[in-house]
Image (cartoon, helix red, strand yellow):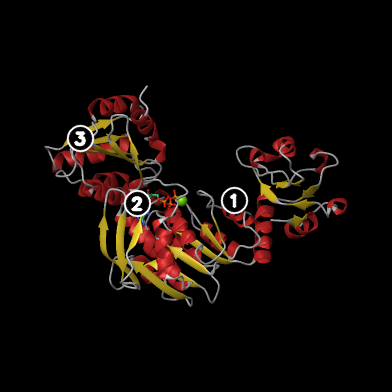
Amino acid sequence: MKMQLAEIAHAVGAINDYKEWENVSVTSVAFDSRHLQPGGLFIPLTGENDGHQFIQSAIDHGAVATLWARDLATAPADFPIIQVADSLKALQALAQYYLMKINPRVVAITGSNGKTTTKDMVASILATQFNVTKTHANFNNEIGVPMTVLSMEPNTEMLVVEMGMDRPGQLDFLSKLVSPDLAVITMIGEAHIEFFGTRDKIADAKMEITHGLSEDGSLVYNGDEPLLRERVTDLSQSQVTFGQGEDNDLFATNVAGTSTATTFTTNEWPDTTFTIPMIGTYNVNNALAALAVATVYRIRPENAQKALANVTLTENRAEWLKGSNGEDILSDVYNSNPTAVKQVLAAFSKTPVTGQRVVVLGDMLELGDQSDAMHAGLADAVDPQAISHVYLVGPHMVALQESLAQRYPDLAVTHFAADDLASLSATLQGSLTAADQILLKGSHGIHLEQVLAALQDPV
Ligand code: ATP
Ligand code: MG
């Protein structure tokens, strides 16, 4: 990007006299002084730390100007300063201005699960016919979304933004910030139900993504979800549904999988076989969401096909890795909730194996009142024919241990305390062989990545 300080001052409502610096030109923005690029504008945000204290580090990294939401007496002398009342609001206002200036079409993606995966798929597909900028990594909140906007090259034609939410009102805000031309809701799950109480309320909050949707825009949503079907009836924008049901505008046929990839065809393009380099029927749903976007923007199916086959995921959370005993590890250790566990167990239980399939499940956090029932309910997804041993980690998994003991008394189930990952790792390390497969899945707070590290590189 390239903006003059005068433009920035105007966009953010500067409250100081910046005239002497108005021709300074800025080529990027950063709120973390360590990530500041030479020529950048520093945006000192206030979170756990007050960003203002890092101004010297920003200057050392090549900042040419800074926003300042403090008394000017505390600002560095003779350095281009734009004083504002609130630096987060200024960041958002600047993003809004830059978005209007570049004027790309905006695709906004939300959902309880699958946002990042779908975002990467959509961006990959659109990039076959347009210049695309997408959300970097998982920058999906009220800081991440404006940063994504400000990361656009001036020639950007399509901006693909992930939008996360953990409370009502957040998507309302983000949607109005970027006024999407197309909004996508991947699915309604139970993530953050502790704060919402019911799936109904989660669905209400997800629908807020339509609050800024342009009048001639479209909504792509998971039509298998009755809570969404009920809620779209009074929207004036056009709608495209995807999902497993054949009443959706787009659904998959002939789904087949290997241990690393999944193929399927669709009702829309019956002669095109799509391949995605990942397992799990839930990823077919994510791909269907992305293909629904492709239909709106008239992407040719052969382009979508190539794009999906080669999609690069910024954060490939479910990935196959090798352990030091030669075992195959399906690692999915950054995020967990009931839907995701059921899906990944179903996929894992079907992958061909010569030895044993072993499962390690860590607590699913933030499920509130319904936590015990949801942990116990995972027993539905454990197939004792397919799984030899289930290892459980964390206090909430005691509920699953009990339900498995009742249901499948012969199944080997072992529970470990959350602070005893070392014993779990040692047990696994001592029993896994090159013929075996192991699944690791849990909320990030349980830190199964430490078990992964121990299996890959035992000390
Ligand atoms: P976050 O809220 O952390 O940003 P996200 O919505 O971006 O998550 P992804 O990173 O795409 O989601 O996927 C995270 C995990 O969610 C996956 O590893 C998988 O276990 C599960 N998942 C992904 N897509 C779906 C889906 N469509 N339905 C159910 N579960 C899914
Ligand atoms: Mg994400």
User: Ligand 1: does it lie within 8 Å of the C-beta at label 2?
Assistant: no
Write down the residue under mark 3. 413
Q: Could you say which disc has been placed on residue 203 in the image?
A: none
- Residue reaching furthest to the left: 410
Residue 366 vs 217, above or below: the answer is above
Q: Is residue 87 left or right of 195 when viewed as pictured?
A: right
Query: Identity of the amino acid at label 1?
Result: Ile
Task: Pick whichever of labels 1 and 3 is earlier in the sequence.
Answer: 1
Q: Of 213 and 434, which appears nearest the observer?
A: 434
Q: Of 301 and 284, which appears nearest the observer?
A: 301
Write down the residue under mark 1. 143
Residue 19 placed where, x, y %?
87, 54
Write down the residue under mark 2. 278
Query: Identity of the amino acid at label 3?
Result: Val
Quadrant (top left/top right/bottom left/bottom right) for the C terminus: top left
Residue at (41% x, 50% y) in the render: 192
Front disc: 2 or 1: 2
Query: Identity of the amino acid at label 2?
Result: Met
Residue 317, picture quadrant:
top left
Q: Residues under labels 3 and 2: Cα distance?
A: 28 Å
Q: Please, what secondary structure does the residue beneath circle 1 have?
A: loop
Task: Pick whichever of labels 3 and 2 is earlier in the sequence.
Answer: 2
Within 10 Å of disc 1 (Cα), the crowding (few <14, some 14-19, many 20+) is some
Q: Please, what secondary structure does the residue beneath circle 3 have?
A: strand
Report whether residue 221 is seen.
yes
